[in-house]
Image: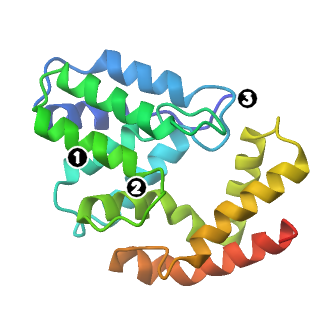
Amino acid sequence: MPHSEALDRERWAALWVRLGARGDGLSIFNQLAAAYADPTRAYHTAEHIGDCLAQLDLSRSVGARLDEVEAALWFHDAVYLPGSADNEARSAHLAGTSLTGSGVPVSAADRIAGLVLATSHLGIPSETDAALLCDIDLSILGRSREIFHRFEQQIRREYSSVPEFSYRSTRSEILRGFLRRPCIYQTGYFHDRYEAPARSNLTWVLGELGD
């Protein structure tokens, strides 16, 4: 089934110019578009990237280097193989090599790659832009119950090859990890809007998973 949204080419082109990259960036845009349109994906699609960019637009007062945060959002799920431990590392590598190869200063490209790595959510980010990026990526946890439930269904479809018992066990452990955090969201903007509903959604779905 084709995804309902496509990546915003005009927005990408504007970001490309602001980053100081050479050319029009179309070949990299097409590479990203193909990745997010992969039919095996259900959640990590162009729709997710568009939603993340919309969340960024609502929280622009939070970050420091907003163009770098935006670039990281475009790349952060470019490589996505369900269950793989190196998706973020490979996405970060793609970001770094794509940007430096297009004339973006190495310092900026390295920061963007570092931001992409932060979306592994293995730790709690303290740096401002990493905190903003991770909060944007996790904002889905605090949406309405209907949207959150749809997200959980999409994740399950991406892991359709995993037996039900194994999936429930692994998914429960991941979601419990967020509930165990003192705060799911590290920026005031996202904490105020999504912390309480995220905890409610997570508690609900853990019950559904039999936790």
Q: Which type of secondary structure does the marked residue at label 1 adopt?
A: helix
Q: Which residue is mark 1?
A: 68
Residue 162 in percent (x, y) is at 82, 40
Residue shown at 77% from the left, 71% from the top: 206
Query: Mark 1 or mark 2, which is nearer the start of the sequence?
Result: 2
Q: Which type of secondary structure does the marked residue at label 2 adopt?
A: helix
Task: Mark 3 vs mark 1: give the one in front.
Answer: 1
Q: Check the image and report above or below for 38 versus 180.
A: above
Q: Amino acid at mark 3?
A: Met
- Residue 144 or residue 19, whichever sits in front: 19
Q: Which residue is mark 3?
A: 1
Q: Quadrant of residue 83?
A: top right
- Residue 12 or residue 20, whichever sits in front: 20
Q: Which residue is mark 2?
A: 54
Q: Is residue 134 left or right of residue 48?
A: left
Residue shown at 51% from the left, 76% from the top: 194
Spatial CA distance of label 3 from label 1 is 32 Å
Q: Check the image and report above or below for 128 versus 74.
A: below
